[in-house]
């Protein structure tokens, strides 16, 4: 994507719902792929985990595996 004169700000989590903030360019790339491939939010998330080319296009070098809470 073309660089612009403005500063890159991360998309901030609201109300502590998400643990990570991602760069705006990454969020835009994911949004575009979601519309190009007609994917729901959950399907897009799965695709980012499973399809390396989508991760590369979104400029996500690595996605941490989900943490599963130990049984209590």
Image (cartoon, rainbow, N blue to C red):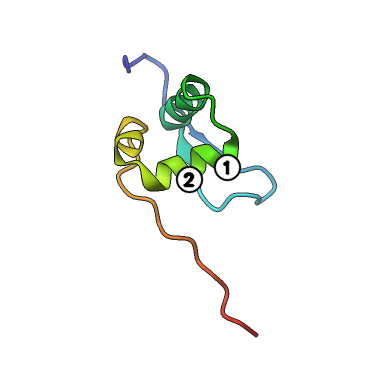
Q: Residues within 10 Å of mark 2 (few under 14, many from 20)?
A: few
* Residue for badge 1: 42
Residue drawn at point x = 70 percent, y = 47 percent: 15
Q: Residues within 10 Å of mark 1 (few under 14, many from 20)?
A: few
Asked which secondary structure carries label 1, the reply is helix
> In x, y percent, where is residue 30?
46, 30
Residue nearest the observer in this picture, 72 or 1 = 72
* Residue for badge 2: 46
> In x, y percent, where is residue 29?
42, 26
* Number of numbered labels in the structure image: 2
Do residues under tags 2 and 1 come within 8 Å of each other at their CB atoms? yes
> In x, y percent, where is residue 57?
32, 30
State the image quarter where residue 72 is shown.
bottom right
Residue drawn at point x = 44 percent, y = 40 percent: 47
Asked which secondary structure carries label 2, the reply is helix
Residue nearest the observer in this picture, 6 or 23 = 23
Could you tell whether 18 is left or right of 10 in the image? Answer: right
Residue found at the very far bottom of the displayed protein: 72
Residue drawn at point x = 35 percent, y = 39 percent: 55
Residue nearest the observer in this picture, 40 or 29 = 40
Answer above or below: position of 21 versus 4: below
Residue nearest the observer in this picture, 7 or 25 = 25
The CA distance from mark 2 to mark 1 is 6 Å
């Amino acid at each position: 994507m073309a660089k612009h004169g403005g500063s890159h700000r991360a998309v901030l989590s609201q109300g502590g719902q998400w643990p990570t903030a991602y760069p705006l360019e990454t969020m835009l790339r994911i949004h575009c792929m979601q519309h190009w491939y007609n994917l729901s939010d959950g399907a897009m998330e799965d695709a980012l985990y499973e399809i390396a080319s989508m991760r590369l296009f979104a400029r996500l070098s690595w996605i941490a595996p989900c943490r599963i809470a130990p049984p209590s």
